[in-house]
Structure formats: C-alpha cells, structure tokens
Image (cartoon, coloured by chain):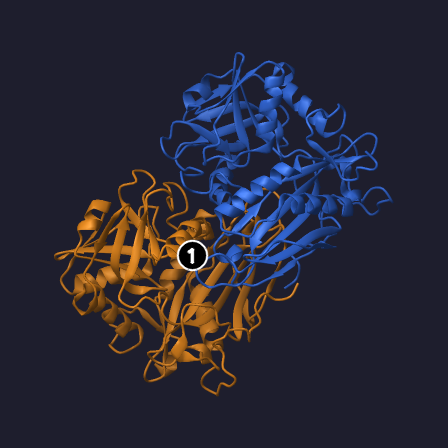
Chain colours: A blue, B orange
Amino acid sequence: MAPSVQPSSSPLRTSEGDEKYANVKWEELGFSLIPTDCMYVAKCRQGESFTEGKIVPYGDISISPCCPILNYGQGLFEGLKAYRTEDDRILIFRPHENALRMQDGAERLCMAQPSVEFFVEAVKQTVLANKKWVPPPGKGALYIRPLLIGSGAILGVAPAPEYTFLIYASPVGDYHKASSGLNLRVDHKSHRAHSGGTGGVKSCTNYSPVVKSLVEAKSSGFSDVLFLDAATGRNIEEASACNIFIVKGNIVSTPPTSGTILPGITRKSISELARDIGYQVQERDVSVDELLEADEVFCTGTAVVVKAVETVTFHDKKVKYRTGKEALSKKLHSMLTSIQTGLVEDTKGWMVDIDPCQG
Amino acid sequence: MAPSVQPSSSPLRTSEGDEKYANVKWEELGFSLIPTDCMYVAKCRQGESFTEGKIVPYGDISISPCCPILNYGQGLFEGLKAYRTEDDRILIFRPHENALRMQDGAERLCMAQPSVEFFVEAVKQTVLANKKWVPPPGKGALYIRPLLIGSGAILGVAPAPEYTFLIYASPVGDYHKASSGLNLRVDHKSHRAHSGGTGGVKSCTNYSPVVKSLVEAKSSGFSDVLFLDAATGRNIEEASACNIFIVKGNIVSTPPTSGTILPGITRKSISELARDIGYQVQERDVSVDELLEADEVFCTGTAVVVKAVETVTFHDKKVKYRTGKEALSKKLHSMLTSIQTGLVEDTKGWMVDIDPCQG
C-alpha cells in the first residue's frame, strides 16, 4: 500500500529551504501535519524494557493487522512542544511530565513502559534530528507526538506481546484560528469519560468517541465542545482536547484530576503561574451554573496553550466572557510563553535544552 | 521494521498440508492467531464509498504514524465465523448483521461506511481465498475479523481523511479452555461503558480499557470479568467480550441494548432460539441481585458461542449455577451450532454459502 502522506505533500512546503531552516511557509503555520525528516522508533516485548531506539526517516510504519492498537485501542499518545529562542537555543517544555503521564497510561492499559530517562532522551533525539523544522522565534513550535502502541499480534482481547514507542513531529502554529476567543458548546447528551475508565490517562480511546460531538458543534459554528461528568451531568470536565478554567474575582477554579479528566501539563503549569501572581487556585468540582456565572473562562493544553473562551452555549443560553487585554488568560499566556520561548528566565526548571552545551 | 508475525510462526502449524487443508493441527485449535494465506484490503477517502478491494497475501500493513487509528482510536472491528459442513460446503453465520453493526459504528465514529453488499462480498471473498483454513467439520471454525480504521494522516482530533477496510482470518477452536463453565468476577470498581459513549458499537475503544480488570481477574483464577452499568452500579452489562443471560424458571433475561452494551449477533440469535423452544425472553435491566439468585447464567458471543457460567463472584460472595447436560445453555449451544455447521436445516436464513452453486 502506498504511503498515506508523502513528506512533500503539505501545501505549506516551499520549494527551497536552507541550512538552518526547512522549506516551510512559517508565517502560515496552523495545526496541521507538515511531515519532517525523521522520526524515532523503539520496540520492546511485553515484560521487557525499552533499551534501544533509533532515528529513522519519517514515513509509514509496518504493523500486523492483528495487533491491539488496530483492533482494541491499546495505545497512548503524548503531545509536547519545542521552541526556538531568540538566541537560537531549542527548548522543550517539561518533557519529564509527559514521560510520567505516559507511564501512568501504560500501567492503566497494561503496556510496557518507557522509563522517564528513555522517553526524554528519545524526545531530545527527535528534536535534534528535526532541528530545521523548529520554527523561527515567534512563529510557532515544533509539536512532538510520542506514541506508545500495542503492536505485537494477538487475536483475543489481551495485552500485546510487543510494543512500539514512536515519536514524530510537525511544526505548528495556532490550534484554533479564531482570534478573540473560543465559542464552546456544552454537550448535555454525550460524555467523554466515566469513573474507572481511561479519561484520566492520555489513551487513544478517549478521542475518537468525542469526534462526532465535535464535528456537529463545528458545523454549527462552535470552536469546541465542553463535556460534563457522566456521573451527575452537572459538572464541567474538559473540552475535546484541552482542560478548562473559570475565573471569578480572585479565584481560579478547574475540575480536579480524579480519573475522568486529563491531568494536563499546561493545566498544572498555569495553576502554578496563577498562584504566583496572587490568584487563589481551586481544583474542585465546577458546576455548569458556576461556569455560566464566571467572569472569565479559558482553556489550556499543549496544542492550544492558553486560550480565552469568548462564549459558552448551554441549551439555549449563551454567555459571553471577558477576553482581550484585560483577561487573566492573556496574562497567563504571556507568562507561560515567555518562559517557553526563553524570553524570561526559567526559574522553575521547566525547560530542557536539547543541547545543554549551547545553553 | 520486520513483520511482527511470520505466517509460519504458529506452533499449531505442521510441516505439510494437502490440497484440501492447510497444515494445521486441527485437534489442538484454541483462540489464538494462526495466520492464513490471504487478507482483503480496500481503501476509500472520507466522503466517498468503498468500491473496490482486493485479496492480498496476509502480512503487515503500511500505515502513517499520524493516522487516527494509531493516535485517536478511530477504529471498529467485527468478528464472525465460517463453518465447514459434513457435505463440504462452507457457511458463514449472519454476515449481513455484522455489516449493519459496522455501519452503526462507522456513523458513531464519523467514518466512511462499507455498504452491506460490499461488506458481505468481501467476507465471502476472504473465506474463499482462505478455504483451506476452514477447519474440518466439528474441529472449529474460521474466525473472520473485519476492521475499519482511520488510516489517513491528520494531526488534530478529527475524522481521518482516508479509511482502510481490511479482513483477516484465523482458524479457531474454543475461546475458553475451561470445560464445565466460566468463573466470572463482577467488577465493582471499573465500568466498561457510559451513556453517550461507544459501548453500543464495536469500537476498538471499548476493549483496551477492560484489559487491566481482565488480567487481574485471570491472575486470580477467574475466566472473565462481568461489568456493571456506570450510571447506577447495580445492573449487569456484559463481560469483557461477550453478552450475558440469566435463566430463572421459564424466563431468560438479558440486559437491553440501550447504548452501553454490544448488540451481539449471537445474543440476538440465542434470544430467538430460546423463544422458539418456549422460553420467555426479556431484554431489560438485570440487577446483580437477580444474577446472584438465577438458576443458570450463560454468555454469548461470536468467539465464545454459548458458554455456561459455573460461578459468579461478587465481593466475597460466590454463587454456583446449573451447568452441564441439564442446562438450557447446553441445549441452545447445540441448537445454534447445528444450524451453523449445517447439521440441521437453516429455516431462518442465517447461513450464507460462500459458493451458492454448490449449496
């Protein structure tokens, strides 16, 4: 079978690159795949450890039709970003956190676990091998997508006998093109996760089930869907691929990570930054009623970073929130991206330089 | 990357086959993969129809690392069986039902849908091409596994731009080796599905999340796990990969297909057969209390066919049920398999002959 995507197939590729940069129209980056030169691949048997991986040319992988990732959804992914600084260093945001989250997911889905060291080293190698694809400062980031998939053949429902850990990357810009803020629709019919399910890990199984709701919302002009908890239907959980915060006065609230929402790394970082500037941050159940009465609402995630919510629609009610220069989300976005892009000193130890000798 | 499984790798392969049969130790069949000669593959773009597929040698497929089946769980599977009759016909059990169920799943996951005709024709072609792998009468069946997967590359959470429909097959014997009956453990902590989720379609996303509970139960000596509904935690839903029935006097009860359990084809067929012999069949909520007080309990599914449950364990309580010759499940198993293997006339129009001219 022919590759689904040829490396040259993106409309954002230009005819020529140079020694420093790949041939990409950097000004036009959105959140779509621009295949890069290389990816990272490692394999291990169930019960063994990932000990060796390698950088290979980006391209289709070969996999058994009878493996659990294709048949039973035994797969996890991560998402993280590398940024180019003004002084031409390349920094990765909190890769150890992604490594730990993948380990939690691997435990939940009975998969072989890459060690934190192995994961972080593999991410660094992937970024280094795709250095030309890290956008110029201010133009975006190199989005890095680690996958852990059950790739060994097995017919019945059981852990795979073999696992593949793979990392690919793509330069990206904004996830949502909407400028002023997101327009969310609260989904009051379907839920994203349930207690004892996989909603608290970054399992592939959490995503295809929300696509229908997302497609329907987008076709009605919304940016994204906000899900409610399956147990009561009263509390907000998260959007299709990002966490949510509400602001009321000096209090910033976000749903707790009790197994049905993703423990977002941007979520955790933003909570810390909000506390740093004097806000009280509460991780607790947040009802739809509170959401509708908030001063401000925003979403966080690796892909969206920090994004203001302009409106929320629940049944026939549409509420508008503070956005723009006055919004807390604007300030937090600026604080976070300043650290990520090296504009301010990283006093938190969040950034990992792919080449410490240059740092 | 090297193929995960070489066609010759099964320990059940013998050195020689003949013109009629492949080289398999038919007496030793269980439910594990024995790769056959051929598989069926078709592709189509989102918004278009599957119009053409082909039989190709069984082996690894090539797929983009950035496709929704690997990243977001956008995949469905089916399972059905072909049987060899004493007069050497090959019959497939109710393939139209699998085709319809895959269409429901494709609608739920926003995927391109194979038409019923296309699906059934592809199944027939797959069986015909693997005719030597259909076990001798009474030794098992050819298990047929259609997959529909989001195979086109896309970075964000969205429907794939391209889909692959693939069918592979494997000769199989009994799913559970246990002879007298299954020993089920009721999982009172984790659930399989929630309202508005994907529990009612045969989505890959329903299976990897139950593996942990299943592995833990098996390591404690149980055959399988029985899940309770996420909404109340009081009603039984299904086991890890089969439906459940309880028998009390003349009444056979099974949970309703209201979105959180799989609408099993064996389930539907067994309900019809039970009615045929005078039982009252009720599709309704069945509480754990009722389960524990039943005369008999059994599971149904393509892989397990009809299998008696010998014991159910809920917390510290273990209940034993009627099994063996006196059990209704024994009678229903016999009725169903007699139709499937052509021992009795199929008056229901369930069986499809892969070569009607011989039929």
Q: How many marks?
A: 1
Q: Chain of mark 1?
A: B
Residue topped by disc 1? B102
Picture quarter containing residue B269?
bottom left
Q: Can residue A114 be spotted in the picture?
A: yes
Picture quarter containing residue B120?
bottom left
Left or right: A125 in relation to B62 = right
Three-letter residue code for mark 1? Met
x, y percentage for residue A136? Answer: 79, 35
x, y percentage for residue B183? Answer: 29, 58
Q: Is residue B333 above or below residue B66?
A: below
x, y percentage for residue B128? Answer: 46, 76
Q: Which residue corresponds to the image point at 21% horizontal and 64% vertical from the top-left? A: B323
Quadrant where the C terminus of chain A sits is top right
Q: Which residue corresponds to the image point at 66% horizontal and 33% vertical from the top-left? A: A174
Picture quarter containing residue A82?
top right
Q: Is residue A40 above or below residue A277?
A: below
Tell me the crowding category of disc 1: few under 14, some 14 to 19, or many 20 or more residues within 10 angstroms, Cα based: many
x, y percentage for residue A72? Answer: 47, 55
* SS label for mark 1: helix
